[in-house]
Each structure stands twice: as structure tokens, then as C-alpha cells.
Amino acid sequence: MVIYSFIALVMLSGCEPRTSYKVLSFFFDGVSDPDKAIVTTEKTDVKESKFNQGSTHGPFAAKNCGACHKREQGNQLVLPKEKLCVSCHKLDFEGAEWVHGPVASEGCWICHSPHQSAYPFLLDAPAKEVCFRCHEERAVMKNEAHQDVAAGCLDCHDAHASQRKFLLK
């Protein structure tokens, strides 16, 4: 009975981040406060402003939860998560010589947050941190091309697909 009350409370709270925070933080520890700034230590080039801004998914910003969720069915997704993102975001990598594994498997959520992020492109962490979840940092840094490089991974590599090996731009 308690679980049904909790589900009803979460569903009634809506998608507004402040309200969701109040409800979820009552029940769970560690819920991020949307009013607190997230500090990042990622080194970025100031001239590339797209790498210095957070991002919000359009339907989430418009409070159009129904674009992705079946509200009447406990916020279940309208499609399997592997198909959800590509139902709107047409990833056209036809002819690309190299496609990143998560992209090929339609695993957008491996790198991206579905609602909003303190990082660009809805990344769920700084780009280097996202990359080093799968790519061992020590092995990457052994490559002489990465020696003394202050640039971020996305400065040289395309995270989705490329005509060049190692997803080079």
C-alpha cells in the first residue's frame, strides 16, 4: 500500500524540477538540488561557449512529459529506451566509416541525461569523465598523440561517428 501511495505522490508532483526534488528528497538521500550550482573541474576553452553551458532537453523544458512518458501508466516510456531518442533525433551516420559503440546500439543514455544537465549536449558528466568510464585513462594517455594535450576529448574526437579511425574529426 505504501508503494502505491509513493507512486501516486511522485506522479502528482509533475515534471517541474523543484517539486520533484522536494518529493524525491523526502524519500531518498542524495537527490540533487536543482537550485544549487553544479561545479565542474573540467578544463574547457572559454572561446568555445557551447562547452561551458548546461543543457535542457526541449520536451522537458516545455513540460511536455508525454513526449517520452505515458503519464497514465506510471511514467512508463512510450517506447523502449533504445528506440526513444532516435524516434525524434534522427542519427544519420549512413556512410560513416566508424560509429561509436553506444551510438550503434542506440544507447544514448550511456552518455546523456534525458532531462537536463549542467553539461553541454545533455552529457551526464564532464566529457572526459564520460569517455573514461569506458576507455581506460591510463591506456589513452600512453598514446603519444595525447601527451601534453590540455584539450578535451571532444576537441579532436567526434563522439558519434566519423570517416576517420578513432572517431577523429
Image (spheres, grey):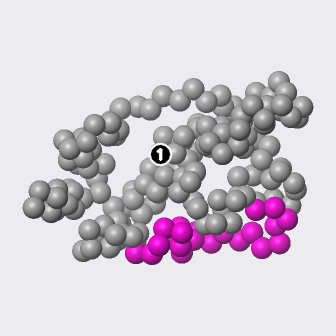
> Would you say 22 lies left or right of 58 here?
left
Q: Image quadrant of residue 87?
A: bottom right
Q: Locate residue 94: give its quadrant.
A: bottom right
Amino acid type assigned to the residue bearing label 1 in the image: Ser
Left or right of 36 in this view: 116: right
Left or right: residue 168 compared with residue 2: right
State yes or no: residue 23 in magenta: no
**Residue 109 visible in the displayed image:** yes
Name the spot of residue 39 as percent of width and height, x first: 48, 28
Judging by the rendered image, the residue that carries numbered circle 1 is 117
Q: Is residue 83 magenta?
A: yes
Task: Give the residues drawn in magenta, as a range.
Answer: 78-99
Position of 105 with respect to 153 (left or right) is: left
Report helix, strand or loop for mark 1: strand
* Front residue of 131 and 59: 131
Along the line of sight, the residue nearer the viewer: 15 or 132: 132
- At x 65%, y 28%, the residue is 43
Q: Residue furthest left?
A: 1
Residue in the image at 79% along x and 31% along y: 141
In this rendered view, identify the residue nearer to me: 8 or 139. 139
